[in-house]
Image (cartoon, rainbow, N blue to C red):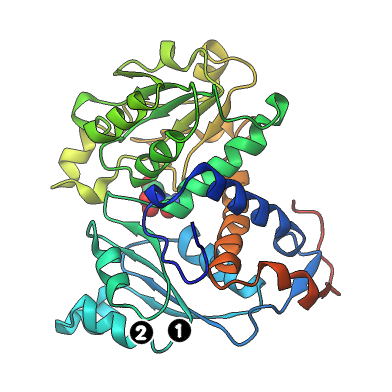
Amino acid sequence: MQFAGSHILSVNQFQRADIEAIFAAAARMEPYAHRRRITHVLDGAILGSMFFEPSTRTRVSFGCAFNLLGGQVSETTGFEHSAIAKGESLYDTARVMSGYSDIIAMRHPEEGSVAEFAAASRVPVLNGGDGANEHPSQALLDLYTIKSEMHGRGGSIDKLRIALIGDLRYGRTVHSLCRLLSLFDGLTVHLISPKELRMPEEIVETMCNSGHDVSETEELESHIAHVDIAYSTRIQEERFGSREEADLYRGRFRLNQNIYTKNCEPNTVIMHPLPRDSRAEARELDNDLNANPNLAIFRQTDNGLLVRMALFAMILDVVEQVDSEARDVGWYTGSRY
Ligand code: NCD
């Protein structure tokens, strides 16, 4: 696809070559994300960050990614602080905000809302999550993480064995990830969820049509026994009618060190888009996994910077200028990566 000037609304926009291009650009961002070099390539550019649903890492990492390329961030968070609370339409908000920014990252609780906003925007819009629909940048960072965690198999995603666990009905990260995985060959996919929270039929069909071996189950332990990746998710409480309804499913599929040791192969990588629900009644990924070197959740969050920097640089068409606008950092940076 042509990245310069494009919106990123759905992973359906991508072919394999596009993903390879994003990952190549993401790898080039490492010296900047890892605080060895700084670049000013987006000096003067403004990101409009508009998050109308709770968010920590997506909102902050979009912002940091833009800052790391030398740009500035202008934030709008929550309907109550925006004119949408006064009845303003997405169309009007998009016309206004796109006059104030060079690119916009947006999260909104309704499916299709970010695409509606983008249609009226005068600048590129990145979907930071629209209801239960899609979360493209998360799926890209998840796939980037999978690829780097699979270095032992040459970084190949073809023939990957993966278990997706939890709320597969409302979890937009797994929706986008499964659509991306459909571009690869010969995967074994275990979809582990309560039957009421199964992966949408259309996505299961897309994966089956790609030739993947897909099974749907309510049983955790035998289905995480032979996988490269166990990807856990949170019950998406905010999409249920009530807290009580979400409580029916919370804590149903828990992964802890004991269950991992008993059932998983020793190299199985544990992933989660975060936030994990660490309340006693949930704990889909127990804190006792924190010492497990195969817990990749904070490598995922670190990789989020690389992938979001790559998207900004590609959409604003500065990938080739990043290094020429750069210098070494002059402050103590430690060794956090
Ligand atoms: C996810 C989301 O918002 O869809 N979080 C994230 O962006 N990393 C997953 C979740 O909230 O459970």
The secondary structure type at the circle numbered 1 is: loop
Residue 82 visible to an observer of this rendering: no
In this rendering, position of residue 157 left or right of residue 189:
right
Name the residue carrying label 2: 97
Q: Which mark is residue 101?
A: 1
Residue 165 pos. (x, y %): 38, 29
In the image shown, does 139 or 249 lie closer to the viewer?
139
In percent of the image, x 47 and y 50: which residue is there?
138
Q: Position of residue 198 (x, y in %)?
A: 25, 29
Q: Position of residue 316 (x, y in %)?
A: 56, 73
Tell me whether the residue at label 2 lies in contact with that at label 1, contact meaning CB atoms closer than 8 angstroms: yes
What residue is shown at x 35% (from left), y 61% (from top)? 54
Front in this rendered view, residue 332 or 177: 177
Name the residue nearer the viewer: 251 or 96.
96
Q: Nearer the viewer, residue 26 or 245?
A: 26
Question: Circle 2: is it few (<14), some (14-19), or many (20+) Cα within 10 Å?
Answer: some
* Res 215 → quadrant: top left
Dot 1 crowding, Cα within 10 Å, few <14, some 14–19, many 20+: some
Task: Label 2, secondary structure: give it.
Answer: helix
